[in-house]
Amino acid sequence: MTTAKKPQEEPSAAYKLAAAEMRAKVAANKLAIEHEVLPSGGRIRLVLKGRPIARSELDALFGPSAIDLPELRQALK
């Protein structure tokens, strides 16, 4: 029967362990920000409970469009 050998610690393994420990400390001390949107499963999910902005209000809010094509202007009318 052979005896179990203690695995040698590699420099990259020590770095990974220290990085994981630091991430755990940062996560434990993190304070939640009100209305913060966090990803879930790699995606940010939002529920929008508002009304769309009317076309007449768009220019007042965001200024005139940088792209002004006559074909598109006629299609919107």
Image (spheres, grey):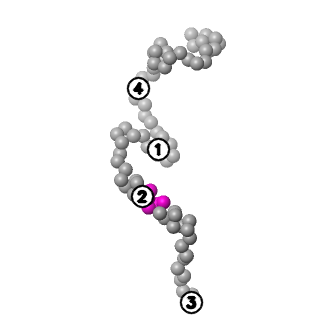
Q: How many marks?
A: 4
On the picture, is 30 further left or further right than 75?
left
Q: Nearer the viewer, residue 68 or 77?
A: 68
Residue 42 highlighted magenta (yes or no): no
Label 4 element class: loop
Q: Amino acid at mark 2?
A: Ala
Q: Nearer the viewer, residue 38 or 13?
A: 13
CA distance separating discs 2 and 3: 40 Å
CA distance separating discs 1 and 2: 18 Å
State the residue position of label 3.
1
Label 3 element class: loop
CA distance separating discs 1 and 3: 50 Å
Q: Amino acid at mark 1?
A: Pro
Where residue 45 appears, as percent x and y from the top left, is 46, 39
Label 2 element class: helix
Where residue 55 appears, as percent x and y from the top left, is 49, 15
Q: Choose the circle earlier in sequence order: 1 or 2.
A: 2
Residue density around tag 2, few if under 14, some if 14–19, many if 20 or more, within 10 Å: few
Q: Amino acid at mark 4?
A: Gly
Residue found 47% across the figure and 63% down from its top? 18
Residue density around tag 3, few if under 14, some if 14–19, many if 20 or more, within 10 Å: few
Residue extent of the magenta highlight = 19-23
CA distance separating discs 4 and 2: 37 Å
Which numbered circle lies on residue 39? Answer: 1
CA distance separating discs 1 and 4: 21 Å
Residue found 58% across the figure and 18% down from its top? 66
Quarter of the image with the C terminus is top right
Which numbered circle lies on residue 50? Answer: 4
State the residue position of label 2.
24
Q: Amino acid at mark 3?
A: Met
